[in-house]
Image (spheres, rainbow, N blue to C red):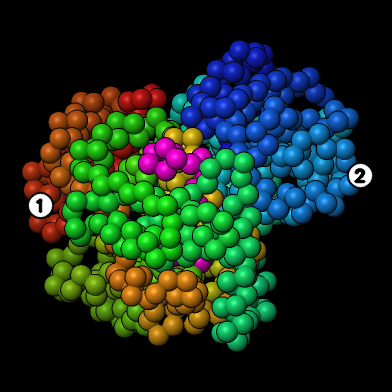
Amino acid sequence: MCGICGFVSKRDISLTQLKDMNDTMYHRGPDDSGEEIYEISGGYKAGFAQRRLAIMDLSALGHQPMHSGNGRVSVVFNGEIYNFQDIRKELSGYSFRSCCDTEVIIAAYLKWGIACVERFVGMYAIALLDRECGEVYLVRDCIGKKPLYYWLDGENLVFASELKPVMSCPGFRKNIRRDVLSRYLYQQYINAPETIFENVYKLEPGSILTFSDGKAKTRKYWEINEVYHRQIKEPVKDYSQAKRELKERLKKATAYRMISDVPLGAFLSGGYDSSLITAIAQEHSKEPVKTFSIGFHEEKYNEAKYAKQVAEYLGTDHTELYIDEKEMFGLVESIPRYYDEPFADSSQIPSMLVSALAREKVTVALSGDGGDEFYCGYNIYENVAQAQLLDIPGGLVHGICGLPLVRNAGIGEKLPFRVKVIAQNRNKETKTQFGAGNYIVRAKKMVKNDGKELPCHYETESRYGESRWQARRMLLDMDTYLPGDILCKVDRASMKYSLETRCPILDKNVMEYSFRIPHGFKFHKGDKKHILKDIAYDYIPRSLLERPKVGFGVPLDQWLRGPLREQLLAYSEKGYLEKQGIFDADYVSAMIRDYIRTGDGGPATGANYSKLSWSFFIFEQWYQKYL
């Protein structure tokens, strides 16, 4: 686990400047660093740099940049190739000098070319230089566990694991993209390939970027939609077989992720996913697995007591920490330093706290991420299924009432909220993304749009070719919410403390097999994540797991209208916003003041707008730090 950065450019970027870029990510790799610049074809120079968090082969032989024995290939790499030992057995013709997975990437490339990445099972962001053809490749893992940004400036390329190295590169211009801001305010994150800056992109999951002769082209080598439609052609119709084979794949994926030369543990919330992964890990371990959870003194948010019961049943070496609001609030100021692109999912705060707790004893932690998206776990999936049943009646209501997206003084105004939401849900490309129209309207009005339509949703649903809304929404979340929010949140929260997180449920073979499992095995008679829960019950009594999902809670409304009130008011001051030139100064200033005074986003809205206000606050906090 590390951070990488570099460039391919005709500009004069010095080794010192490359080192400065690299050192902005010290937290991602405090154990070692390397920076090198090479002369390559076409008058270009390539700079490769890495900050290392030593996990495999702790010796100096794991130092990066790493080169092939013949000097043809150079690599910097962030992540883990879990099946590197299996691949290494196929590379007997290569003379290995180390025991690490980085060198396997080099040897695999020399044998199979860049298509070698299709053999990798892992999480990774890779930059590879091939001097023979003069090409540089950037590669990101299938589901986007590891981040990779790149800036295209004419015939120059700059890349990095985070935005900070890109912002530190000589000549970088911090021009904000206003067209992504409404969606950010509404969704609370910015999804690949977009970023907050012009000409800067996130490499999409499962993608390869090839840079040659000053030109970049990207292609997908693993794509959710394509894999899904290929796999559903071979469904596993027998439930017992599906459960048995999924369980075996989860066990193998967990075993892969327990290979480490440093102490390893697991996050344990007490929910199904983390409990299942912990149970499998304990089955593979000769010693009690170290597990970690945080608790809240507020009973309605607290799952620590359940995690403790699971830990006691499994016999893990459990550590829990109860935190109060003051401890959570103390991390607000640090958010833009580690989330160096606006990111407003407030569960980032408890994620940072549990990462800090784990890092006191381990360097690697297993997590249960991915269970909800791949096995139908979120409450929204239940709502989506119900909405599809009501879509035709909703269309009739829409036709009768003539409901626009905004509030209406006619008959539509008197309709119940849920009826109104379904009636307004007429866009075929966003059928599964229905929500409160007021939130969407306000997110759009907050940003100066120069007459352009600013999107809040992902108008991409037809590409999935899936008539069942529930399955379609799951695919959409795998493409957007999972990599853009969940995995980004965990990566930055854990790497703040130089902690590596590994997700067995997001193993490539597990993900691909999940698409062969009939949807009815996942959502069975209203039971979400049915097959995954069934596997968990093989390890842990149902009585310890069966309860409503809670999730991390952060008192945003109390903070924004309390200790953060003056800061929020200063950010929304009309003169400041006019000078900034990004938001509609009159609208935002009035909206924030109405929110602080009443808890609403405006007169008689009947809704709490802490979520939009928090997204705005986080943006301004980020803006103050970097611009």
- Mark 2 is on which residue type? Gly
Relative to 509, residue 319 above or below? above
The span from disc 2 to disc 1 (Cα, nearest Å) is 73 Å
Q: Vertically, is 579 above or below 613?
A: above
Question: Viewed as shown, does residue 428 lie left or right of 130?
Answer: left
State the residue at coordinates (32%, 25%): 624
* Element type where label 1 sits in the image: loop
Visible residue check, residue 38: yes
Which quadrant is home to the C terminus?
top left
* Chain-order first, disc 2 or disc 1: 2
Depth order, front residue of 170/533: 533
Q: Position of residue 376 (x, y in %)?
A: 45, 71
| Region rendered in magenta | 355-374
From what the image shows, is residue 242 above or below residue 453? below
Q: Which residue is mark 1?
A: 603
The 10 Å Cα crowd at callout 2, few under 14, some 14 to 19, many 20 or more, is: few
Q: Residue at x 34, y 59 (%)?
A: 307
Mark 1, other Cα within 10 Å: few <14 / some 14–19 / many ≥20: few
Q: Position of residue 250 (x, y in %)?
A: 58, 65
The residue beneath circle 2 is 93
The image shows residue 358 at horizontal and vertical percentages of: 42, 43
Residue 53 against residue 264 in the figure, above or below: above
> Residue 530: within the magenta?
no
